[in-house]
């Protein structure tokens, strides 16, 4: 729990990101009037968020995904924010469609608020995000589950999924620049055993060189 500020105990510190000045100002006034919330700052672009994140105690980012940030531009900004910080990001103005919510979830949201939501819904979503909770309607939940199932099927179909834990360990060492002899020494196994593993890895992945195998596994791990 944070220290009291002006007689009120601050429970959540929020940063608002919106390219539209009037939206930033409006959200700022609403949030500042809410008991238990401190507005840490409002910014128009992702680049301006980083100095604010350097301050201690930022609990959640609120990203306005309406206007210029609707659709793909907003998703790109969301990915940038999610990659830049571990602070949860709540997206404001997400269309109330499973496909849109799933796209935002894949980009890194911790919560979302649709255009039909109330200010109370916004506050509840912000608080839920700080607790690590993600709330959505049943049909959106169904869309998320279907997407997870599709990703699982893609993962099972990938030749990388056929590699054993030992083979994955060896590929990781190959990717780090270790020779077969160095891998044998590091794993305390025979050089011939390493060569057999490498042969099996190349065969399973359908590649000719050790570097190609390492790159294939790296791409797979990045995608999943």
Image (spheres, grey):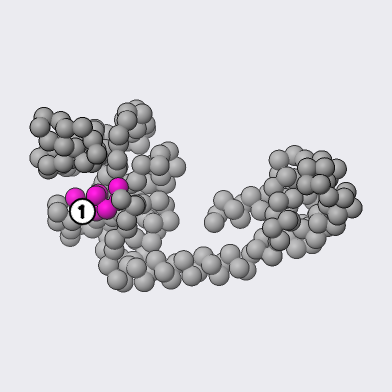
Residue 124 among those drawn in magenta: yes
Task: Give the position of the C terminus as an image quadrant.
Answer: bottom right
Residue 167 visible (yes or no): yes
Per the rendered image, the range of residues in magenta is 123-130
Q: Main secondary structure of the magenta part?
A: helix
Query: Which residue is drawn at the image coordinates 73% and 56% (left, top)?
Result: 166
Question: Where is residue 164 drawn, in percent x and y?
Answer: 71, 61
139 in the magenta segment: no
Residue bearing mark 1: 124
Answer with the quarter of the image where residue 42 lies.
Answer: top left
Identified at 78% across, 42% down, the residue is 186
Q: Give 49 or 134, whichever is nearer the viewer.
A: 134
At 55% from the left and 70% from the top, the residue drawn is: 153
**Which residue is located at x 18 percent, y 56 percent?**
121
In this rendering, the answer to whether 45 lies above or below 199 is above
Q: Tag 1's secondary structure?
A: helix
Task: Give the class, few, some or many, for how many residues have Cα within 10 Å of label 1's Cα (few <14, many ≥20).
Answer: few
């Amino acid at each position: 729990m944070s220290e009291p500020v002006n007689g009120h105990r601050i429970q959540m510190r929020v940063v608002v990101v919106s390219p539209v000045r009037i939206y930033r100002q409006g959200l700022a006034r609403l949030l500042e009037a809410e008991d238990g919330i401190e507005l840490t700052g409002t910014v128009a672009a992702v680049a301006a968020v980083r100095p604010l994140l350097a301050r201690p105690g930022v609990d959640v980012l609120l990203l306005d995904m309406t206007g210029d940030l609707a659709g793909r531009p907003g998703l790109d900004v969301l990915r940038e924010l999610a990659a830049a910080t571990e602070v949860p990001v709540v997206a404001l103005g997400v269309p109330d469609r499973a496909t849109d919510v799933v796209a935002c979830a894949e980009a890194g949201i911790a919560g979302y608020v649709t255009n039909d939501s109330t200010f109370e819904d916004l506050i509840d979503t912000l608080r839920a995000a700080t607790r690590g909770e993600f709330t959505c309607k049943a049909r959106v939940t169904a869309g998320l589950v279907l997407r997870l199932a599709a990703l699982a099927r893609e993962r099972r179909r990938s030749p990388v999924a056929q590699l054993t834990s030992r083979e994955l360990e060896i590929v990781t060492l190959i990717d780090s620049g270790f020779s077969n002899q160095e891998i044998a020494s590091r794993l305390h196994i025979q050089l011939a055993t390493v060569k057999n593993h490498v042969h099996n890895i190349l065969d399973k992945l359908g590649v000719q060189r050790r570097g190609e195998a390492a790159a294939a596994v790296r791409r797979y791990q990045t995608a999943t």
